Structures are given as C-alpha cells and as structure tokens.
Image: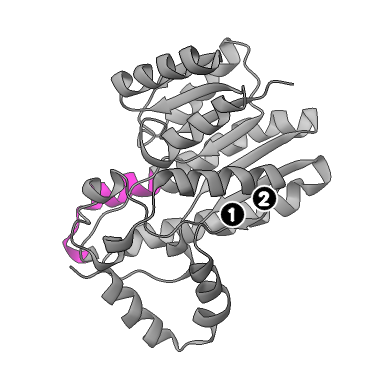
C-alpha cells in the first residue's frame, strides 16, 4: 500500500535525501520548505523518476502559524499523512550573550515549537487509523550542553526527549516515533549556522548516509538512531560517566574555530 510522507526542510540536505528514499519506495510526498524553486525542482525530479504524487507547500516554520497552515493544506487536499518527518531545523554559532535574541527565538520556534505542533496535528489521525511513523531529526548535540551553540543544543535535547516519551505513549496505538541523532553532516546547515571552520565539521558525513540511517530506523520503529557507531558508544556509555565540567570543556572545544 502506498504511504504518504510529509517532510519539512525538504529542499536540501537530509530532508532532500529522505524525500528521495521515500519516493524510491513508491511513496507519495508532501514537501515543505521556504524555497519554492528548490521544492518544485525536487518534486519534478521525483515525479519523473518514480511516478509518485508530490504536493509542494512553501512555508517558513519560524512563523508561529505555519504548522497550522500546512495541516490545513493537507486536510483541504484530502491527504492522509502516514509518515511525518520533522527535519527542518537550524543552528547558530557564537556566545549567547552576543547573539541576536530574535535569531534564538526563531531557532526555538523551528526546532521545537513547529515540530511539536505538526506532530500534534498529524498524530491524531495516525492514532485513529492505528498506523503511522514519526521521524524527528535531532542530533548528537542533544546528549550534552553546547557552549557556543547553547540554544541549538538545548532545542535538540528537547527533540530527543520528546520523541522518546511520545514513542512510549503511542506504542499501544501501533504508531512509532524515532529520533535520528546524527553527528556532523555536510549540508547547508554549516554555512547557515556560521559553522565554517568549526573542528567538529572537519570530518562530516554525507547527508545521504544520515538519511538512510534515519529512514531504516524509522521503518523498524527504533527509539533513537545514530549514524556513527563510535558516537553512539561515546554518548551512551562514556559521556554519562564523565564530570559535568569536563563535558562542558570538551563540548566547547569541539565548537571552537
């Protein structure tokens, strides 16, 4: 049976690759991002290559009512969302005291609030139909505080925690929720977040590898997925045992240019 996936942040990076993976499995798509040109180009590519149906919705999830407008569009079109992939998100480098408060608030809106609102809108239908999958793209950043990206790390901690709690609540309804926690990934996220030259991104993995990891984990109903085994071991078994001040020093050093 054909499933329909709604993917936010689908115009590039992990979101674009997730769209290609879902389409390759003959799944229909609702693609959401700010860039109409990039979305329409991707939609044309996927329709031609895989013969799938694609709806493009141009929205900025930094706007408080964007999630509600997206839901209204799919409802008006009679589209049932079987797979919700909350991929949209962004970061920003620098000392919190020196960063723009407007930028930090927009980050919280996109990374947490809009993600939560979209999940709330679409999970109701999944529960009613007793089927559905949710993939929230988080980060390995969610497992520790992040000096020089204080708000970004905190937003991802929310995403990972929220996703796991949601998964437990939805288990009896045959609906799954998975948090994808990749390490550094080579995408436009780096330039957009002023992260060029940061140590952590010198050995970034491809967006395709992260997308494949997340999609497969979602299909299996896994709680948390890491695209790097070494990071999974480090974050699950080493970091929790280290003194907090040491973790903060290590985390800051990884973010320094």
Horizontally, is 90 left or right of 102 in the view? Answer: right
Q: Give the colour scheme of this rendering.
A: one colour
Q: What percent of the width, then of the height, locates residue 24? A: 56, 27
Horizontally, is 226 left or right of 3 in the view? Answer: left
Q: Which residues are magenta?
A: 97-109
Residue 76 in magenta stretch = no
Q: CA distance from mark 1 to mark 2?
A: 6 Å
* Residue beneath the point at 51% across and 16% down: 54
Mark 2, Cα crowd under 10 Å, few <14 / some 14-19 / many 20+, is: some
* Residue beneath the point at 43% across and 85% down: 244
Between 123 and 13, which is closer to the camera in this rendering? Answer: 13
Mark 1, Cα crowd under 10 Å, few <14 / some 14-19 / many 20+, is: some
Give the residue number, with chain letter if any, for mark 1.
Answer: 162
The quadrant of the picture occupied by the N terminus is top right
Indicate the secondary structure of the residue bearing disc 1.
Answer: helix
Q: What percent of the width, then of the height, locates residue 239? A: 49, 80
Does 240 appear above or below 38? Answer: below
Q: Are marks 1 and 2 in contact (CB under 8 Å)?
A: yes
Report the residue that reaches farthest toward the front: 49
The quadrant of the picture occupied by the C terminus is bottom left
Horizontally, is 62 left or right of 256 in the view? Answer: right
Classify residue 122 by image quadrant: top right
Image disc number at residue 72: none
Does 179 appear above or below 14? Answer: below
Main secondary-structure element of the magenta-colored stretch: helix
Q: What percent of the width, then of the height, locates residue 11? A: 36, 30
Give the residue number, with chain letter if any, for mark 2.
Answer: 166
Classify residue 131 by image quadrant: top right
Report the residue that reaches farthest toward the bottom: 243
* Residue beneath the point at 30% across and 65% down: 200
Indicate the secondary structure of the residue bearing disc 2.
Answer: helix
Q: What percent of the width, then of the height, locates residue 104? A: 29, 52
């Amino acid at each position: 049976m054909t499933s329909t996936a709604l993917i936010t942040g689908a115009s590039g990076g992990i979101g674009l690759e997730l769209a290609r993976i879902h389409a390759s499995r003959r799944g229909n798509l609702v693609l959401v991002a700010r860039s109409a040109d990039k979305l329409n180009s991707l939609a044309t590519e996927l329709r031609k290559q895989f013969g799938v149906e694609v709806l493009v919705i141009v929205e900025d999830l930094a706007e408080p009512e964007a999630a509600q407008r997206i839901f209204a569009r799919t409802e008006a079109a009679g589209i049932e969302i079987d797979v919700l992939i909350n991929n949209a998100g962004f970061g920003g480098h620098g000392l919190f005291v020196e960063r723009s408060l407007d930028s930090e608030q927009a980050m919280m809106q996109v990374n947490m609030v809009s993600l939560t609102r979209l999940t709330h809108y679409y999970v109701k239908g999944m529960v009613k139909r007793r089927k559905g999958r949710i993939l929230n793209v988080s980060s390995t950043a969610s497992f520790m505080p992040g000096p020089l990206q204080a708000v970004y790390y905190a937003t991802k901690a929310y995403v990972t925690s929220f996703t796991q709690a949601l998964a437990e609540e939805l288990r009896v309804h045959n609906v799954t929720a998975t948090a994808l926690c990749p390490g550094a990934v080579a995408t436009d996220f780096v330039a957009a977040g002023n992260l060029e030259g940061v140590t952590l991104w010198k050995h970034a993995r491809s967006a395709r590898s992260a997308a494949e990891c997340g999609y497969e984990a979602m299909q299996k109903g896994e709680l948390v997925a890491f695209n790097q085994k070494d990071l999974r071991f480090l974050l699950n078994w080493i970091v929790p045992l280290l003194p907090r001040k040491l973790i903060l020093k290590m985390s800051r050093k990884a973010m320094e240019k």
